[in-house]
């Protein structure tokens, strides 16, 4: 009987842990999308949802630089 009680208690504990870990943790965006004078305007809150960079760009090639770099030259 004690073993049965321990098994039931362990199963309830596992179910509790699973429900806590699988619950919805998504935060909702608090900005607004409005249309002013035919232009779509996106207004973001001061405090962003994501603290780290979600999307970043790195310049790979720029045309028309004052310096001449042989790696960026085009030949015909």
Image (spheres, helix red, strand yellow):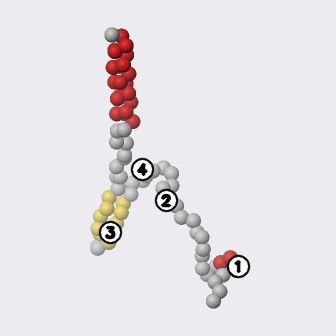
Residue ID at (38%, 57%)? 44
Q: CA distance from mark 2 to mark 3?
A: 22 Å
Q: Nearer the viewer, residue 68 or 44?
A: 68
* Residues at circles 4 and 2 in contact by the CB criterion of under 8 Å: no
Residue farthest top in this picture: 1
In primary-sequence order, the first of circles 4 and 1 is 4
Quadrant hosting residue 10: top left
In primary-sequence order, the first of circles 2 and 1 is 2
Q: Disc 1 or disc 3, which is closer to the eye? A: 1
Q: CA distance from mark 3 to mark 4?
A: 21 Å
Q: Mark 3 packing: few (<14 Cα in 10 Å), some, or many (20+)?
A: few
Q: Position of residue 7 (x, y in %)?
A: 36, 19
Tell me, for residue 20, which label it has, or none.
Answer: none
Which residue was labeled with disc 2?
55
Which residue was labeled with disc 1?
70
Which residue was labeled with disc 4?
49
Which residue was labeled with disc 3?
40
Q: Position of residue 48 (x, y in %)?
A: 43, 52
């Amino acid at each position: 009987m004690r073993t049965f009680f321990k098994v039931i208690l362990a199963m309830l504990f596992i179910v509790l842990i699973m429900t806590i870990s699988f619950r919805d943790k998504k935060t909702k965006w608090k900005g607004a999308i409005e249309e002013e004078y035919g232009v779509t305007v996106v207004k973001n809150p001061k405090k962003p949802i994501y603290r780290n960079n979600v999307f970043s760009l790195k310049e790979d090639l720029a045309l028309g630089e004052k310096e001449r770099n042989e790696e960026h030259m085009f030949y015909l």
